[in-house]
Every structure is written in structure tokens, then in C-alpha cells.
């Protein structure tokens, strides 16, 4: 055997062993191939960093990329990777740390590019520079990143990691593109689907498919990826949570509960004092929503206690405080266990919504109107907040409707009926505003969906046909919501449509099974169970 052949064989054996090692070590973050010119020992950390990065496990990714830098100080792609570990690519304010990561590689673009030995790696570095160093805010940086990755993809259309990062950069750019958002999401989704079909264990492929199709219309396209991704990258909390974006769109409440439980546990176990707690907040928020749709109030309370602990561990974290506030308000609204807590102008929008709904339900119209007035002030301060405006219209409309009901009950129909018409018009305005906004994605926002609330209001005044229409719209936007199923069943029952009423009551019983719940008793009585 010649020396040349012997060396070739040795290299082949080493490459094979390296591939097996990589596959074994990446089992908990997915499977993909991303060759670079870095030192082989540094490459192993780089690959793990990329795996974490594809699943937005930013802290874990950053640790791996910095380990790669320690082994190979001129490993350009390790600095490229670190650049993307400091902020979420889809939201958040401008952060200077991504630029600082690149500056460790070199003070100038020329110096940085000189350490990237291939044209492909130079392209990745240029894209990182666009993301981190473009003048302007995050919208400008996201668009610059997307455009730089588009150039690299045009050069290397068959490179799967170029394609994966072009997909996520396009999703990022979509957030800053205004009316082109959906078009760009579909472009990214098509590319991610192609990658997923080639390699369903690729964490980025499944992840980006879910993000691209996260709305009621397109969610069915992503269901296969959602079920697969749930097991693809268990080392990353966000990867355990992410499938629930699609499970929510299908009303799969057991899966929403279970996978957010898993995501929260992973995030909590990995947490160290000083770490960000976004994964804990997000999974607890959505986990509670799933359990409330299942009618499990004790689990909802458990989620609240967990959120209290997260805030206790991070007392100055605004997101943790906001998440806890939202979860307490959601518990009140979804359980309909109304609570007249103390009014304060410092209450958040979600707290005001829960208080306003409670006030109407318990007959305190003075408080309800006070809440509506406060929310109107908040709308004036934040005129572009569609969710806040919808909530304000909901409380104002319900308060006026309750006042109209009182007038009619006193025999003052001449005043009460016009007031009722005005009230219903406010609730329809809330529905119209919801229709004009972004399609639902995730837990209900506002906490009481406008279509569901409108349906309940129209049913209460005897307009069952209009109510049924609104409940059906609500179920198209947020499938399998029990309160919308219940409202639709009651509306069809009122209309004398036994077939549709039975269908909705049966669907409700597929979600709720607690015989002590009045709605369950109602459904079983109607269906003769």
C-alpha cells in the first residue's frame, strides 16, 4: 500500500469517526452537517453551537461558540455564531453585543474577512456584519441581514446551512417589512419545508417551518414539523415549546399543556442566577393557557405559583412581572371566577380587562365605566395598540349593554333599546378591529377574544343567529376554544338547529369532562348522555 493511499485511508477513517461522533453528540439538538475550515476540536463545539442556535437556545449556543474560540482564536465562524446569540432575531431592541462579538475577530471588515478562508465563510461574516453593524435600529439590521443572506444563497443554492440561515434571516426581515411580511414568511416557509423534507431531524428546518406558518390559515402545513420537532432537540427549552405554536392553532390542548410543561422544566433546570428567563416566562404563560382550555383550574394555579417563583428569583425582571400579571388576569377571565380587586391607575391592560369583565358580571357598572375610561386614556397614549383598543371597546360595550339591560328591565325601553344598539356596535367595532389585525398566533390576545365576547353579547340579547356567526368565526381563528364551542352550541340550540347544537356540545365534551362543571352537565343533558 502506498503512503498516499495509506494517508487517504487514515483520513477517511478519521472523517468517518468524526461523523459518528458528531451524530452521537448532536442527538439532543438535531442532525445536520456544517463543514468549516476551523480546527477539528473547535469544530465540535461549533456544531453544537449551531444546533443550539437553530433552536434559539442562545445561552447554550454562546457557550459553545466561545469554547470554539478558545481552541482556535482565528476561527471566524465561531465569532459569526456568537454574533447571533445575544438577542432574538424577531423582536427586541437594538443590542450592541453582537457587534462586540465581531470586534473580537477583527477591528475592521477587511481584517475579519481575512480570517475567513473560503468565499462561503466570508459570505457568512458579511451577513453577520449586516446584522450587527448596519446603521439604524433592529428593523434596518434585520432587513440588511436578510439581503446579505439572499446574496449568499444565490452563490451557494445547494448549501443546506446557507439555505437554513437564509430562511431564518427572511423570517427576521419579515418582521420589519410591513405589508410584505406574509409574502416573506411564505418564502421562508417554502425553503424550510424543502429542508425538512430532505432531513426531518434538522432543528432549523422544523423550527422555521413552524414560525413561517404560525397562523390559523397556514398552520396545517406545519403540523408534521411540529410533531417531529417536539423530539428533535430536547436539550433546548425553546425547541420543546415551539411545537405548541402549531398545537394551539389546532386546539390540541393536551399537547399545549404537556410540551410547555416540558419546556418550562428544561428552562428552569438550566437556569442560573443572572440568566435571562424568557423561556420560563413564555412556556409558563402558554402552558397555563392550555390547561385553562382543558378546564383544569388547579393546574392554572400551579402555573401561577411557578410564575411567582420565577419573579421572586428575578425581582427586577419586567417580563416576569408582566407574565405573572397576565396569568392572574387570564385565570379570572377563562374560569369566570370574577374578582373585584382594587382599582388603580397603575393596573396593566390585562389586569384592567379582568377587572372590567368582573365588574360587569357582578353588576358594578360604576367600576366598569371607570375601567373603560382608564383604558381609553391608555389608548390615547398608545394609539397604535390594536389589542388595547379592542379591550377598551369590550369593556365599554359590555358596560353600556348592562346599563341598557337595566333600563329595559325598568320598563324604559325607549332609552334602553337605543343604548343596547350602541353597545352592540362597540362590540362589533372590536370584532372589526380584530379582523384587521394580525391573525391569532399563540394564547388569546386580548385575553378575551373579541369574536367570542361579541357572540356572548348577541346571544344574551336574543340574536342567536348573529351570535352563532361570531362563535363560528371565533372557532376558525382559534379552533377548539371551549367557551366558543359552548356559545355556539347554545346559539344553535336557541335557533332550533339540533344537529349543529349536538355537534358543538359533543366537541365541548371532547375537551371538558368534569361532571361537576355546569357546562358539562348542560351538554350531557342535551345529548342525553
Image (cartoon, helix red, strand yellow):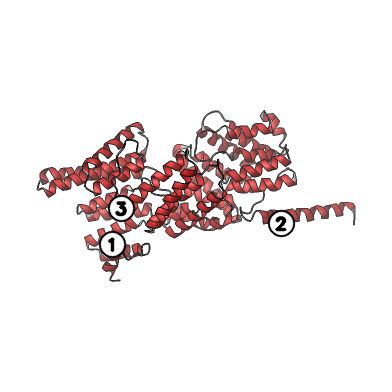
Residue 419 has which mark? Answer: none
Residue of label 1: 518
Q: Is residue 347 above or below residue 25?
A: above
The first of marks 3 and 2 along the sequence is 2
Of badges 1 and 3, the one in the foreground is 3
Instruction: Answer whether residue 146 is visible to the viewer in this image.
Output: yes
Q: Is residue 214 left or right of residue 120?
A: left
Quick one: SS at disc 2? Answer: helix
Distance Cα–Cα, label 1 vs label 3: 13 Å
Residue closest to the eye, 299 or 450: 299
Q: Which residue is mark 2?
A: 20
Q: Residues within 10 Å of mark 1 (few under 14, many from 20)?
A: few
Secondary structure at numbered mark 3: loop
User: Circle 3 is placed at which residue position?
Assistant: 337
Residue 71 % position (x, y): 73, 41
- Residue positioned most to the bottom: 529
Nearest to the observer: residue 94 or residue 176: 94
**Distance in Å between CA atoms under marks 1 and 2:** 58 Å
What residue lies at 27% left-to-right and 52% top-to-bottom?
455
* Image position, residue 458 (x, y; %): 23, 51
Single out the residue that lies furthest toward the left.
411
Q: Position of residue 130 (x, y in %)?
A: 59, 33
Front residue (pair 94, 301): 301
Quadrant (top left, top right, bottom left, bottom right) of the N terminus: bottom right
Amino acid at each position: 500500500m502506498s503512503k498516499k493511499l495509506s494517508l487517504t485511508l487514515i483520513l477517511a477513517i478519521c472523517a468517518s469517526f468524526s461523523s459518528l461522533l458528531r451524530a452521537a453528540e448532536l442527538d439532543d439538538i438535531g442532525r445536520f452537517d456544517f463543514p468549516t475550515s476551523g480546527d477539528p476540536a473547535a469544530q465540535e463545539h461549533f456544531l453544537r453551537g449551531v444546533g443550539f442556535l437553530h433552536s434559539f437556545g442562545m445561552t447554550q449556543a454562546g457557550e459553545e461558540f466561545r469554547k470554539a474560540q478558545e481552541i482556535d482564536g482565528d476561527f471566524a465562524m465561531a465569532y459569526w455564531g456568537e454574533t447571533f446569540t445575544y438577542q432574538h432575531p424577531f423582536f427586541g431592541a437594538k443590542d450592541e453585543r453582537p457587534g462586540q462579538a465581531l470586534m473580537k475577530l477583527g477591528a475592521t471588515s477587511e481584517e475579519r474577512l481575512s480570517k475567513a478562508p473560503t468565499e462561503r465563510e466570508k459570505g457568512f461574516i458579511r451577513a453577520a456584519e449586516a446584522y450587527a453593524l448596519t446603521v439604524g435600529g433592529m428593523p434596518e439590521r434585520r432587513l440588511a441581514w436578510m439581503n446579505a443572506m439572499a446574496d449568499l444563497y444565490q452563490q451557494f443554492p445547494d448549501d443546506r446551512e446557507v439555505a437554513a440561515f437564509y430562511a431564518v434571516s427572511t423570517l427576521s426581515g419579515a418582521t420589519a417589512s410591513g405589508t410584505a411580511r406574509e409574502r416573506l414568511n411564505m418564502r421562508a416557509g417554502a425553503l424550510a419545508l424543502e429542508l425538512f423534507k430532505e432531513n426531518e431531524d434538522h432543528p432549523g428546518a422544523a423550527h422555521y417551518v413552524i414560525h413561517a406558518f404560525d397562523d390559523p390559515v397556514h398552520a396545517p402545513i406545519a403540523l408534521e414539523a411540529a410533531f417531529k420537532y417536539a423530539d428533535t432537540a430536547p436539550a433546548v427549552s425553546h425547541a420543546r415549546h415551539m411545537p405548541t405554536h402549531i398545537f394551539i392553532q389546532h386546539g390540541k390542548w393536551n399537547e399545549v399543556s404537556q410540551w410547555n410543561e416540558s419546556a418550562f422544566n428544561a428552562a428552569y433546570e438550566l437556569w442560573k442566577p443572572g440568566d435571562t428567563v424568557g423561556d420560563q416566562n413564555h412556556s409558563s404563560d402558554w402552558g397555563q393557557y392550555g390547561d385553562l382550555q382543558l378546564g383544569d383550574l388547579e393546574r392554572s394555579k400551579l402555573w401561577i405559583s411557578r410564575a411567582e417563583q420565577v419573579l421572586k428569583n428575578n425581582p427586577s425582571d419586567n417580563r416576569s412581572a408582566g407574565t405573572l400579571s397576565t396569568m392572574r388576569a387570564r385565570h379570572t377571565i377563562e374560569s369566570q371566577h370574577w374578582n373585584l380587586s382594587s382599582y388603580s391607575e397603575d393596573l396593566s391592560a390585562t389586569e384592567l380587562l379582568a377587572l372590567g369583565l368582573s365588574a360587569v358580571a357582578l353588576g358594578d357598572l360604576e367600576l366598569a365605566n371607570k375601567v373603560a375610561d382608564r383604558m381609553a386614556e391608555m389608548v390615547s397614549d398608545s394609539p397604535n395598540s390594536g389589542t388595547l383598543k379592542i379591550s377598551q371597546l369590550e369593556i365599554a360595550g359590555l358596560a353600556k349593554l348592562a346599563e341598557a339591560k337595566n333600563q329595559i328591565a325598568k320598563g324604559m325601553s325607549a332609552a334602553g333599546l337605543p343604548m343596547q344598539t350602541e353597545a352592540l356596535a362597540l362590540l362589533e367595532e372590536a370584532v372589526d378591529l380584530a379582523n384587521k389585525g394580525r391573525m391569532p398566533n399563540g394564547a388569546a390576545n386580548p385575553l378575551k377574544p373579541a369574536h367570542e365576547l361579541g357572540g356572548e353579547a348577541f346571544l344574551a340579547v336574543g340574536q342567536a343567529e348573529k351570535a352563532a356567526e361570531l362563535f363560528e368565526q371565533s372557532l376558525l381563528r382559534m379552533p377548539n376554544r371551549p367557551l366558543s364551542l359552548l356559545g355556539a352550541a347554545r346559539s344553535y340550540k336557541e335557533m332550533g338547529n339540533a344537529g349543529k347544537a349536538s355537534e358543538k356540545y359533543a366537541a365541548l365534551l371532547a375537551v371538558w369532562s368534569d361532571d361537576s362543571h355546569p357546562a358539562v352537565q348542560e351538554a350531557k343533558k342535551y345529548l342525553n348522555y
